[in-house]
Image: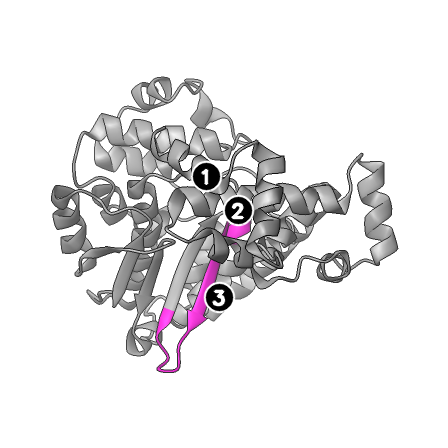
Amino acid sequence: MAHNCTFSLDIGWKTLRKDAGLEPERILRRAGLPDDLFLQKTRGLDTDEYIRFWNALEAETNDPAFPVPLIESISADIFDPPLFAALCSSNMMQAVQRLARYKQLIAPMVLETTVDQNGNLTVSPRWLFATDLPVFLQVAELGFLLKLLRLGSRERVNPLRICVSALPSAVQNSHFSRFFGTDVQYGEQPAISFSAADALRPFLTVNEGMWQVFEPELQRRLGQLNEQASTAERVRAVLLELIPGNEATIEKAAERLGMSKRTLQRRLEQEGGNFRNLVNACREHLARHYLRNTRLSGYEIAFLLGFEDPNSFYRAFMAWTGQTPEAARMAMRHE
């Protein structure tokens, strides 16, 4: 499945900026972005630009509670179709399923969802092209999911648990805990969990007729995204989902992309690439992510990347970077 490589700007930023009393020109200049960015209808932000934009927002607000005020100002009238469509759902469980499918239209992200034996729902956003995300950006994405549930149900529901990959300061956490109704905890990746009762709490905004209006356009845009993406881009997106499950074979990737192994090989060759190199590039990307953002051991990382044993992972990482995993982790901590 292909993924958009930029973050859409058509999600109510004008309204949010106005409500928060922010000056767009100052934010854009601080982020090193063009002054007329918001006037460019087809312009999106790549991951690096998006993070710079959010860093500039944090600097301009100079508020330890950032980004809670921005999240609180979100209302149904500023949503882009994929997000507004979530509010048309019957409950949070269905809303998240729709978001997981259509999130790729507006951001290089995927939403991983799990439901435990008690019916509790956990949602974990994963950025596809970033390994070092500011805490406030993780909080913003998780806060949006909670805001969505509160908007749909019109209830002041609180999550069971919220985790980010690096703990915020005590002052920040006090602000965040008031918004979430619980303290922010450390986790290997950002995640928010809802009780079964809250995940199935009826949305008062449910509108199946409106969903029928939105769905064909969303399906069209998904199809268009797949058509525009290069084969290598589509393979990379699939590999990020296959590698952690130790299923990163060309046969499995071809199956996911709806083509034969021979066709996939031919298309990659036409683009000057090959499957093995893409697997190695994605493994290196994930290895750097795990080393920077988690406390996983080399053995555990090797397992997650599909290596048969830790020594194979160490040799591969040395070939990619000229460093051992431990040396790379130490260097990242001092950046």
Q: Which x, y percent locates residue 291?
A: 44, 44
Q: Measuring from the top left, give residue 249's x and y in whole percent.
A: 72, 58
Q: Residue furthest front?
A: 311
Q: Are marks 1 and 2 in contact (CB under 8 Å)?
A: no
Residue at image coords 49%, 56%: 299
Q: Residue at x 16, y 34 (%)?
A: 63
Tell me the quadrant of the picture where the C terminus can be found: top left
Q: Is residue 283 above or below residue 101?
A: above
Residue underneath mark 3:
97
- Label 1: which residue? 10
Amino acid type indicated by mark 1: Asp
Secondary structure beneath dot 3 equals: helix
Indicate left or right for 191 with 85 as reference: left
Residue stretch in magenta: 103-121
Q: Nearer the viewer, residue 128 or 246?
A: 246
Tell me where residue 161 appears, x and y as whole percent. Answer: 26, 64
Which of the two discs, 1 and 3, sits closer to the camera?
Answer: 3
Residue 159 visible to an observer of this rendering: yes
> Looking at the image, how many numbered discs can be counted on the residues?
3
Mark 3 vs mark 2: give the one in front. Answer: 2
Judge the density around disc 3: few (<14), some (14-19), many (≥20) Cα neighbours within 10 Å. some
Q: Is residue 106 magenta?
A: yes
Say which amino acid is labelled 2.
Leu
Q: What label does residue 309 carry, if any?
A: none
Task: Quote the CA–CA distance across marks 1 and 3.
Answer: 22 Å
Residue 286 numbered tag = 2
Counting residues from the N terminus, which is met first, the one under dot 3 or under dot 2? Answer: 3
- The reply to whether residue 4 is in sight is no
Q: Amino acid at mark 3?
A: Gln
Q: Residue at x 59, y 47 (%)?
A: 283
